[in-house]
Image (cartoon, rainbow, N blue to C red):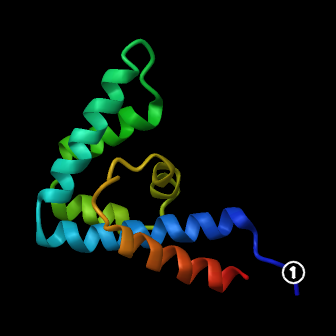
Amino acid sequence: MGLRNPHAIIDGINAAQDRLIARKLRRSSKPLRIAKGNLARWMANHRSAIPTPFTELHQLLTFLNGKEIAAFLSSDTPMARRLRQSSPFAGVLTKAELQRIRRKHEKAGA
């Protein structure tokens, strides 16, 4: 039996992180404030050529409410999978939460 694809492990970690962020977002608007602040900084740093994922994330964070964003984060749509690679929710999860998710998925992939 071979090792699992490292990209699949990373995708699993990103999806698990988004599901936990979605749970937090259903209880509080703080994760949304963090994401909007992160995204605003990132976009300001790319004024001359804002990357497409940033524009798409900006539209999601602007036009969807917290529950809708939580549903999107929990989904497995192609768009959700693609945008997980540029998640503006950095800083929402604690180090311990991030480590727990990473260990679980790396162990499952070994």
In which quadrant is the N terminus drawn? bottom right
Residue at the location (58% across, 79% down)? Answer: 105
Q: Position of residue 30 (x, y in %)?
A: 13, 58
Q: Position of residue 56 (x, y in %)?
A: 37, 38
Residue at the location (37% across, 68% down)? Answer: 95
Which residue reaches farthest right? 1
Q: Quadrant of residue 37?
A: top left
Which residue reaches farthest top? 48
**Along the horizontal axis of the image, is 29 left or right of 49?**
left
Q: Quadrant of residue 60?
A: top left
Instruction: From the image, tell me which residue sits under label 1.
Output: 2
Callout 1: SS: loop
Residue at the location (53% across, 73% down)? Answer: 102
Q: Residues within 10 Å of mark 1 (few under 14, many from 20)?
A: few
Q: Position of residue 26 (x, y in %)?
A: 17, 71
Q: Position of residue 34 (x, y in %)?
A: 21, 49
Q: Is 31 in front, or is 52?
A: 31
